[in-house]
Image (tube, rainbow, N blue to C red):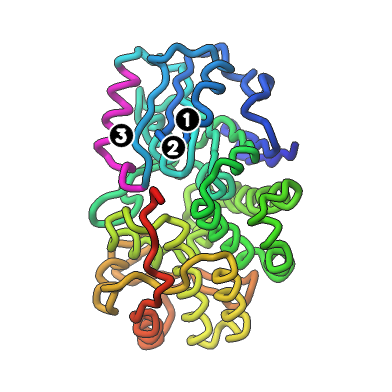
Amino acid sequence: MHTVSIELGARHYSIYIGGGLLSQAERYAGFRNRSCRLMTDRNVAGHYLEPVRRMLNLEAVHSLVLPAGESQKTFENTGRVLDWLLETRTPRDGVLLALGGGVVGDLAGFAAAIYLRGIDFVQLPTTLLAQVDSSVGGKTGVNHAQGKNMIGAFHQPRAVITDLDTLKTLPPRELRAGLAEVIKYGMLDGPGFFGWLEQNLDTLLALEPAALAEAVERCCVLKARLVTEDEREAGPRTLLNLGHTFAHAIETHTDYRAWLHGEAVAVGLCMAADLSARLGWMPRPEAERCTQLVARAGLPTRPPKGLEPARWLELMGHDKKIQSGRLRLVLLKSLGTAVVSSDFDDGRLNETLEHFGSPSPVSRLPSPAA
């Protein structure tokens, strides 16, 4: 087992990474004697709900199963979770456990942040995307018709228990979507990790345990450093949004239904690299390496239909990084050197938006349930 620490003083917690962790009683020792509540979705429930309930000795009423999918990450479902917490008389010292992917973790974390002005919660991520990114760092929230994650709170978990064995039941499409976030970390970390991903991509797709453990740990170590330095995303942590301004526009445009978050991020990474190269900030060959790695992972490199430049700019106009009316983007000077900047040529941005305005067949994806 690997352990990564998030050093935030009184809010310090550990990320545990390894195989079979959900079935290890010692992982629950810090909270199993408290009033626990367990939340998951229908896709995950069939695999892991009962085993985790038995580990925690929970009654059926103390678990909640929601529909699956990004479209479920709504303020309305937050109300449903709050109703359940109240109906089951969850006390102030209770613990809410989020068993599932990023949607479950974000929704449970947001509910925990506002229920009784804040109760503890624990992340049990079961998707690669959640394991390397969304379960770590305390960003919680829900989507709005006008934009992704527009309603939320910072609320750190008390622990993150990452069982790599859960990836064995993950649909291939979900696994590939998670690899988009792994590639993002490679682009941020630099040539070493990025080169490692180029060499080990096939072993990751084959769920080779040692490669998975190394990839997840390396992503978590980088995120831990940035979260420790900038918990509330006022500075360096913003770099973790590489590709996400474009991605969130795609998700809003498709009503959070047709594309998985990681698929949108994959296109966003390609667009951020392309714009960085057009600005003369990033060598074009490095930008092409990024797009090639995304394609090798079986991810889309082009957006869906209907995103003309004017529509892109309209959707990106709701981005949380806008300051003084000016769009800020995370861009690259090179692999491993990222910046948050509003000081870019709008003409070059329009060139990127025009270039990505003609979707290729790979952008026509199956439904998330497929």
Based on the picture, tell me whether residue 163 belongs to the magenta stretch.
no
Q: Residues within 10 Å of mark 2 (few under 14, many from 20)?
A: some
Residue placed most toward the observer, 364 or 5: 364
The residue shown at (62%, 21%) is: 28
List the residue tagged with mark 1: 46
Q: Residue 78 carries which label?
A: 3
Residue placed most toward the observer, 216 or 335: 216
The residue shown at (49%, 73%) is: 270
In the figure, residue 351 lies in which quadrant?
Answer: bottom left
Q: Earlier in the sequence, mark 1 or mark 3?
A: 1
User: What percent of the width, then of the height, locates residue 273?
Assistant: 52, 76
Specify the amino acid type for callout 2.
Asn
Q: Which of marks 3 and 2 is nearer the N terminus?
A: 2
Q: In which quarter of the image is the N terminus?
A: top right
User: What percent of the width, then of the height, locates residue 51?
Assistant: 56, 22
Residue interval drawn in magenta: 70-86
Position of 277 with respect to 63 (left or right) is right
Specify the amino acid type for callout 3.
Thr
Q: How crowded is mark 3: few (under 14 residues within 10 Å), some or many (20 or more)?
A: many
